[in-house]
Image (tube, coloured by chain):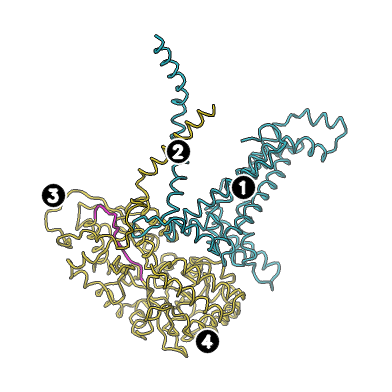
Chain colours: A cyan, B yellow
């Protein structure tokens, strides 16, 4: 009798695990397994289809690879500026769309502002490559206005190319951040603003003492998503400049694709990916620690 | 709570390790397997290579589907593809060929991914420069055993062009159609502008200036120097080869100390700085000059003969012609040859059928069709013999180009880390054009880097 009760208790105790098992299996298949596989491959190299264990050789090579170090530098610049662009533009448009005086036009403007998000990165890049073309729209306008000027080398000048790519990436994805921030703004109770107005707070004070603190959890979430997705970016770079000119736009994500898939150095590509994962994890952990300090509820992931 | 979490964590970890260990990709083995330096065992060659026509009644054979992949559907057009498939189906009704077409820029990475996943494109179009990574991935079937059993077919291929040799000495593919890069021009535009096609570099510069003077809305030429291929084979290599230079010397050392490289860089730099070509060359992809040529926005194009075919698909009225090799002060003017090839995957489960399709691709009827409809010079003795009498001004120059100075003609060889070397070459040339690197330093850097890779081996 006692044994049957124990059995029942045990089965009840483990019932929870049974329920979460499908989710855990899925997690293993789509996240944990590829991660472990990447780390495993990073210690190997391929020779005529055979995998050979080479210890830390790929990692040693990585820190002597000037192009990898250049890609790290480019990625840091690219990620920081794109994230600031996304959040800055997203915040400005979200604040505008959240204003009452904007109501009559809100739906129309919101639709227009969301348009870039409908473009896939391939379609967006293709469209911008035509706009950036030496005889494309921007340069035609420019040379019409200034007939003696040389067309702007948007993608071929190493000083301008990175900015041209940043503009495209910011343009395609700012609507996501705008919508997320707008959702956050609309969840702030209006009576807080009314009370602040009664107390004589001006628009800046209302933003700084009410909007900003209450929006912080949303901003932390979206900036984290943005930093992670931007850091591993490949497609726009691949389509617009292929990392050039002179490696000026080569990001780590693109470098992983190039070495791993184009050049067939899967082991080396996996080593770069492994370093990227570790660096991102460390960076995200530190970032969340810093930005969540003294934060409101909802900031802890 | 902590204990439960630990149990979950350990379970996840163990299952992942098990899953990782059981994974079919990457293919065995293993870290612990003895270091395999030797090439993989040659694929089992058939006792007899399959005959061109089936000996037995086709209906007795098991239906088989093979995959044929490449990037040429847009270049050749659907009709030519259909012709190839239909004529093959007529000979071998039991074999169905499934076409997998992809954009050129993605092809190598798709093949790499397929190799890593153990998935076979039974027959696939390829390039010499892709041989090294695909060979490393163990994806290429050695065709030597097949050719030994089938000497008649093997002898019919234009072997003088070259086979797609792998680093291990196997024949890992055959040259499907040959390409000699040169300066192509739009015949009608030249007539309308009242200009003669250039016969030397100086004339090329003069003609370029005149085109801009006569009609500022068109450009003489566009250089797609954001792409590896355009900066090497189409322009810089092309001119260097006309000066007798090679990437790799006959003794196997890097060849950038040859004065032809310096001269080619000097001339292109002067031309780039002249500002007559489509601006922003360092930001133009390889495909843009082709598009601008097809749209008659540029009058000349440094390209292979297939570009004339592509332009004709977009603009059927367009007539293109090649200029002959420029006379240079250093050499008699060689030409750079290359070809796009066809290979069989070592992972294919239907190698016999794949070999039959490869034979069909290289057959006289396909060669005729491709010459007539696509203006492509098929790499067989039969097709090569047709070129001299072709009325196409691009194709009929090819034998002349080849014969002009055979010693200085150059065809690409598989190099270790070929793709990275191409990237390096591109970056160096871009720095030269940008004015941040001197030409003297550039050739030294190129020679050192290429030699370092050659020394490191495959």
Of mark 2 and mark 4, the one earlier in the sequence is 2
Are both tags, 2 and 1, on one chain?
no
Q: Which residue is mark 1?
A: A283
- The 10 Å Cα crowd at callout 4, few under 14, some 14 to 19, many 20 or more, is few
The residue where tag 4 is placed is: B202
Q: Which residues are magenta?
A: B339-350
Q: Judge depth for marks 1 and 4 and give the one in front.
A: 1
Residue appearing at x 20%, y 53% in the figure? B93
Distance CA(mark 1)–CA(mark 3) = 64 Å
Residue located farthest toward the bottom when viewing the structure as drawn: B329
Residue drawn 24% across and 69% down? B364
Q: Position of residue B421 (x, y in %)?
A: 47, 69
The quarter of the picture where the N terminus of chain B appears is top right
Q: Looking at the rendering, in which quadrant would you find the C terminus of chain B?
A: bottom left
| Secondary structure type for disc 1 | helix
N-terminal label among 2 and 3: 2
Instruction: Decide if residue B194 is in sight here.
Output: no
Find residue B267 and report its image quarter. Answer: bottom right
Q: Is residue B345 magenta?
A: yes
Quarter of the view holding residue B418: bottom left
In the rendered structure, find residue B13 and report the number of the disc placed on it. 2
Q: CA distance from mark 2 to mark 3?
A: 52 Å
């Amino acid at each position: 009798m006692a044994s049957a009760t124990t059995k029942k208790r045990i089965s009840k105790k483990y019932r929870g695990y049974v329920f979460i098992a499908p989710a855990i299996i899925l997690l293993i298949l789509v996240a944990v397994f590829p991660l472990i596989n990447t780390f495993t491959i990073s210690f190997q190299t391929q020779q005529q289809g055979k995998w050979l264990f080479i210890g830390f050789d790929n990692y040693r090579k990585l820190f002597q690879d000037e192009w990898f170090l250049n890609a790290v530098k480019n990625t840091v610049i690219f990620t920081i500026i794109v994230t600031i662009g996304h959040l800055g533009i997203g915040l400005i448009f979200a604040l505008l769309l959240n204003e009452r005086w904007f109501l009559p036009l809100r739906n129309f403007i919101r639709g227009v502002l969301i348009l870039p998000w409908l473009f896939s990165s391939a379609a967006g890049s293709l469209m911008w490559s035509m706009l950036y073309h030496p005889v494309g729209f921007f340069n035609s306008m420019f040379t019409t206005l200034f007939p003696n000027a040389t067309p702007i080398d948007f993608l071929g000048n190493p000083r301008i190319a990175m900015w041209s790519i940043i503009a495209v990436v910011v343009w395609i994805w700012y609507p996501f951040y705008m919508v997320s921030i707008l959702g956050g703004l609309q969840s702030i109770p209006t009576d807080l603003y009314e009370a602040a107005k009664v107390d004589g707070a001006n628009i800046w004070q209302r933003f700084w003492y009410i909007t900003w603190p209450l929006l912080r959890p949303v901003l932390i979430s979206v900036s984290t998503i943005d930093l992670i997705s931007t850091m591993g970016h490949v497609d726009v770079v691949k389509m617009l400049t292929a990392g050039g000119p002179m490696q000026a736009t080569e990001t780590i994500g693109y470098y992983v694709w190039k070495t791993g898939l184009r050049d067939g150095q899967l082991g080396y590509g996996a080593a770069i990916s492994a370093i990227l994962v570790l660096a991102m994890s460390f960076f995200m952990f530190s970032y969340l620690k810093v930005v969540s300090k003294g934060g409101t509820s909802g900031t802890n992931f | 709570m902590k204990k439960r979490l630990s149990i979950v964590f350990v379970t996840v970890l163990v299952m992942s390790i098990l899953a990782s260990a059981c994974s079919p990709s990457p293919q065995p083995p293993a870290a612990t397997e003895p270091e395999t330096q030797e090439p993989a065992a040659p694929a089992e060659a058939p006792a007899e290579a399959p005959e061109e026509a089936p000996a037995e009644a086709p209906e007795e054979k098991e239906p088989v589907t093979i995959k044929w992949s490449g990037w040429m559907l847009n270049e050749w057009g659907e009709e030519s593809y259909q012709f190839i498939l239909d004529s093959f189906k007529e000979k071998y009704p039991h074999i169905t060929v499934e076409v997998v077409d992809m954009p050129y820029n993605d092809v190598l990475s798709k093949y790499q991914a397929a190799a890593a996943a153990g998935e076979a494109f039974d027959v696939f179009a390829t390039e010499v420069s892709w041989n090294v990574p695909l060979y490393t991935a163990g994806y290429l079937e050695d065709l030597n055993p097949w050719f030994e059993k089938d000497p008649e077919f093997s002898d019919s291929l234009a072997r003088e062009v070259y086979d797609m040799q792998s680093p291990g000495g196997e024949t890992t593919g055959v040259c499907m159609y040959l390409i000699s890069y040169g300066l192509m021009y739009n015949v009608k535009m030249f007539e309308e502008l009242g200009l003669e096609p250039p016969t030397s570099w100086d004339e090329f510069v003069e003609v370029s200036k005149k085109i801009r003077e006569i009609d500022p809305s068109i450009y003489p030429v566009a250089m797609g120097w954001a792409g590896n291929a355009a900066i090497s084979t189409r322009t810089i290599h092309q001119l260097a080869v006309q000066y007798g230079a090679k990437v790799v010397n006959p003794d196997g050392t890097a060849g950038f100390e040859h004065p032809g490289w310096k001269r080619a860089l000097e001339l292109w730099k002067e031309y780039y700085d002249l500002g007559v070509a489509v601006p922003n060359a360092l930001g133009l992809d390889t495909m843009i000059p082709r598009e601008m040529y097809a749209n008659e926005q540029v009058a000349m194009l440094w390209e292979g003969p297939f570009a004339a075919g592509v332009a004709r698909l977009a603009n059927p009225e367009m007539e293109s012609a090649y200029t002959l090799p420029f006379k240079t002060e250093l050499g008699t003017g060689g030409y750079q040859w290359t070809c796009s090839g066809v290979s069989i995957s070592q992972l294919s489960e239907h190698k016999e059928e794949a070999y039959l399709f490869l034979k069909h691709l290289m057959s006289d009827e396909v060669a005729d069709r491709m010459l007539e409809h696509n203006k492509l010079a098929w790499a067989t003795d039969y097709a090569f013999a047709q070129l001299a009498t072709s009325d196409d001004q691009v194709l009929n120059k090819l034998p002349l180009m080849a014969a002009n100075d055979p010693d200085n003609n150059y065809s690409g060889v598989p190099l270790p880390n070929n793709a990275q070397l191409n990237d390096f070459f591109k970056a160096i040339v871009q720095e030269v054009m940008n004015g941040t690197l001197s030409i003297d330093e550039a050739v030294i850097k190129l020679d050192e880097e290429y030699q370092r890779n050659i020394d490191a081996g495959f």
